[in-house]
Image (cartoon, grey):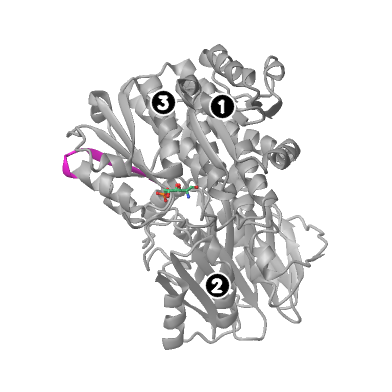
Amino acid sequence: MCGIMGYIGDRPAAPILLDGLARLEYRGYDSAGVAVAHNGTVAVRKAAGKLARLREMLEREPLPGTVGIGHTRWATHGQPTDTNAHPHTDESGRFVVIHNGIIENFLPLREELAARGHRLRSDTDTEVLAHLIEEEYRGDIVEATRRAVSRAAGAYALVVLCAHEPGRIVAVRMISPLVVGFGEGEMLLASDIPALLPHTRDVLVVEDGELVVLTRDAVRVETLEGRPVARQRLHVTWTAEQAERGGFPHFMLKEIYEQPRALQETLMGRLDGPDSVTLEGVHLDAAFARSLEKVWITACGTAYHAGLVGRYLFERVLRVATEADYAHELRYRDPLVEPGHLVVAISQSGETADTLAAARLCRSRGARVLAVTNVVGSTLSREADDVLYTRAGPEIAVASTKAYLTMLVGQVLLTLHLARLRGALAAEATRHLVEELTLLPRKVQEVLNHPAPVEALAREIACCEHVYFIGRGLDYAVAMEGSLKLKEISYIHSEAMPAGELKHGTLALVTPGTPVVVVLTQRHVYEKTISGLQEVKARGARVIAVAYEDDPEIEKHADRVLRVPRTHDFLSPVVSMVPLQLLAYWVARERGHDIDQPRNLAKSVTVE
Ligand code: M6R
């Protein structure tokens, strides 16, 4: 995710762009830049770091001009550096672009451009667009943009400014959001409505596959093929704060609903075919993969729970002994980590002190460290040998949701990649897994489309003092995360355990009416889990099951059932976790808590 802002009118553009970018900083904040047209040229100022650096730069070297574009970045390709910050230009500096999203085929495009003599300066996927537009320019920036984007694949929003035609701004939406704002004798453009609200409440939401041309007092909307599109403008009544959350009352809910999109991003450009996975920052080769004898997964909190899923996948698919360990435990237990071992360190922020320390320790013992992280340029990503970015976009709520789901899918991709290198999975099994993987965004969306049963259940259990979560295998991993989600924002005491463990002690705490959530998707242990469920039912527990939608048995055993679409059993955590995220959210809301910033917690724990 990145934030995009554009202005064309009679007022100085730079302060308007800066103000808009400040309102969009929640979409990304690792670097920022603006470009302003003036006297036949377009000047660019950009800087890595928070917006404050760009602001200082503009105070020292102001940009006059009343037409401009601005960007706040959440890096996906290339570290957050001054050079990689947007805007990007062609070599002449006449064609200036900013971009949100991913250009999937940027590598072949880069090579083609280089072969034709273009010199690209950054590591970004964005820069190729400026060069393509320059190649395609024959006196009309709209046509040049149209031709350039026809060569780009991916999901993105693109904004273009041309020194030869400073009277218009061209933008294209291909999945990533873009909104036009109507002012008095001025027009604006942004990734999201909050950036527009100080200037106007009249907006037009650009749709996928549309190109817009902004002039001072009008907007023209057309398809990428050039057919005009008639579109009504909307009047928004949101406050700026509501709008920043996309109309959702809390960032957590917004982030839960962003998950289908986030998963698409995680997968984008990485599955070249049924048996080929491309992971851009992962450089493991067949020799390493074949001789691999041990994998260590280390992380904290939600990331650790994602690691429990990874452990299961690595062992089942790769047949490699795998341990998953809390980073704060691993670092102090003198682990038997050796050269040739692979350590997968998982962290949304890439800054969790314990995870960094565990990764450093393992690396110092000769192991190869692979980071699974959401933040490009984070400490973990810089210190690791290999990096798999999850591409969830900025996660603001303390309770992690979309980061978790994308960590799961990231690890499935890693499993497929290693399986191919080791020759560990038959072609047919790979094909089936890949097929199901690509269906996940849609299946998660299906769960999100039917929140009513979860909301009703939340009202029922909001007054309970204890809730237990059980499951076996991958369902146990989900139970762990479901329990953490509930306790951290609802402040209800909850515990998770393997379904087979309950009878060894915790069953003593189950009394009539105690809610017990059972996750029940794994075919090979289904009957066993049902037995555990019967044990709690016999003690009067209120049994809540998370089960596949076509499970014919479950109604007989459970008091409430939360249904999820069937998927490959290895992928079930991706769908079965979603109702539990919603459950935690709605229980916390019912209890009137500060959902995005629960008491005593912080988003990143950068101290031991
Ligand atoms: O940034 P990280 O993934 O390393 O953070 C690890 C934990 O602090 C984090 O997952 C925490 O448990 C979640 N915020 C809980 O929702």
Q: Which disc number belongs to residue 321?
A: none
Q: Secondary structure at mark 3?
A: helix
Is disc 2 placed on a helix, strand or loop? helix
Q: Position of residue 594 (x, y in %)?
A: 60, 58
- Of residue 338 and residue 302, the one placed in the foreground of this image is 302
Separation of marks 2 and 3 at Cα, in angstroms = 42 Å
Q: Are marks 2 and 3 in contact (CB under 8 Å)?
A: no
Q: Which residue is mark 2?
A: 22
Circle 3 sits on which residue? 312
Task: Specify the segment rendered in magenta.
Answer: 364-372
Could you tell me how far apart the alpha carbons at marks 1 and 3 are, in whole angstroms? 18 Å
Q: Mark 2 against mark 3, which lies toward the viewer?
A: 3
Can you give x and y, in whole percent of width and height, for residue 517 in the image?
A: 60, 30
> Image quadrant of residue 262?
top right
Residue at x-position 64% and y-position 35%: 442
Give the labeled residue for mark 1.
Answer: 436
57 left or right, relative to 142:
left
If you read the primary sequence from the N terminus, does the residue marked by circle 1 or circle 3 appear first? 3
> How many C-alpha atoms fall within 10 Å of the one at disc 3: few (<14), some, or many (≥20)?
many
Q: Establish whether ligand 1 lies closer than 8 Å to the Cβ of label 1.
A: no
Q: Is residue 103 above or below residue 553?
A: below
**Percent coordinates x, y for residue 223 in the rendering:** 72, 54
